[in-house]
Amino acid sequence: MASLVHTVQENGRIAAGLLLNLLASICIVFLNKWIYVHYGFPNMSLTLVHFVVTGLGLYICQKLNIFAPKSLQPSKVLFLALSFCGFVVFTNLSLQNNTIGTYQLAKAMTTPVIIVIQTLFYKKTFSVKIQLTLIPITLGVILNSYYDVKFNFLGMVFASLGVVVTSLYQVWVGAKQHELQVNSMQLLYYQAPMSSAMLLMVVPFFEPIFGKGGILGPWSFSALLMVLLSGVIAFMVNLSIYWIIGNTSPVTYNMFGHFKFCITLFGGYVLFKDPLSINQGLGILCTLFGILTYTHFKLSEQEGTRSKLVQRP
């Protein structure tokens, strides 16, 4: 009886964690888009708010013993913090200048770019099956972009830069975690303050500080509330991702990611009345097929590797 109660409680905790991540991940996309469309809040300044709130949130978490910080040399995470700035800024600029559908599909190109980077610069090999899944992913993104009636050249430039920098960041995060023997929260604990300091020095050159449109300008109470809420939700996304990875299987995490992908696309067309042509719909389905196939093959290969290690005497 006690074990049954424990199982029910454990399943309840996992369900609550997944629900929190679902709501936070979807809310952050829609809320940021809403802030750009209805308030015109500057992009880099919003990113700076996210970094500051994330840094404060992680400080509170370590004080509550949710994780133990590890002493690291700032020089070891300098380029990582710089790429962290770049990927968040460019991703938000992509969201600001594209429809949610195009923004979301462009992010799917991260997987092919990571594979190219790891193949060319890290001499990592991938099976033919994995390489073939990149065709429908890439084809779907091209189809959607070509038939997007709200196509924005500048938006696609930001989306492309976001994909490249995000891919580099993800590759470097994996390498740094292995090199420094730290988990994602311990790494982010150092990254967030460093990235905040970097953006603080850069923002005055690209965006106004005071006056209309500046981060310290005469914003309405509702705008400031939305910006602060956006920062809190961004932190919740980071925290819940860490928790999900630590408490569920890779299958759960990946399948849940695909579910969020679909809901975010659907929500974008409903909330912001983004037009959707048949060809765009085909592009979305094509990309989704490629992502699901990639995940299936990747998880099968990982399971096969683990089985061989277990069977090895």
Image (cartoon, helix red, strand yellow):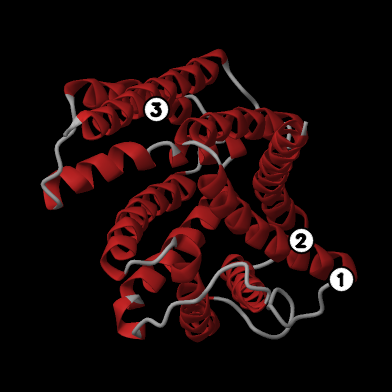
Disc 3 secondary structure class? helix
Q: Which mark is residue 98?
A: none
Give the image location of residue 150, x and y in percent: 57, 35
Q: Amino acid at mark 1?
A: Ser
Q: Which of 271 and 249 lies nearest the eye of the viewer?
A: 249
Extreme residue in the front direction: 1
Looking at the rendering, in which quadrant would you find the N terminus? top right
Give the image location of residue 106, x and y in percent: 45, 39
Looking at the rendering, in which quadrant would you find the C terminus? top left
Q: Earlier in the sequence, mark 3 or mark 2?
A: 2
Q: CA distance from mark 3 to mark 2?
A: 38 Å
* 135 versus 66 height, above or below: above
Q: Is residue 131 left or right of residue 81?
A: left
* Residue that mark 2 sits on: 39
How crowded is the residue under tag 1: few (<14 C-alpha within 10 Å), some, or many (20+)?
few
* 114 versus 227 height, above or below: above
Disc 2 secondary structure class? loop
Q: CA distance from mark 1 to mark 2?
A: 9 Å
Give the image location of residue 247, x and y in percent: 56, 45
> Image quadrant of residue 98?
top right
The answer, for residue 274, to whether it is visible in the render is no
Cβ atoms under marks 1 and 2 closer than 8 Å: yes
* 177 versus 313 height, above or below: below
* Residue that mark 3 sits on: 295
Q: Which mark is residue 220?
A: 1
Q: Earlier in the sequence, mark 1 or mark 3?
A: 1
Disc 1 secondary structure class? loop
Give the image location of residue 194, x and y in percent: 46, 80
Q: CA distance from mark 1 to mark 3?
A: 44 Å
How crowded is the residue under tag 2: few (<14 C-alpha within 10 Å), some, or many (20+)?
some
* Number of dots carrying numbers: 3
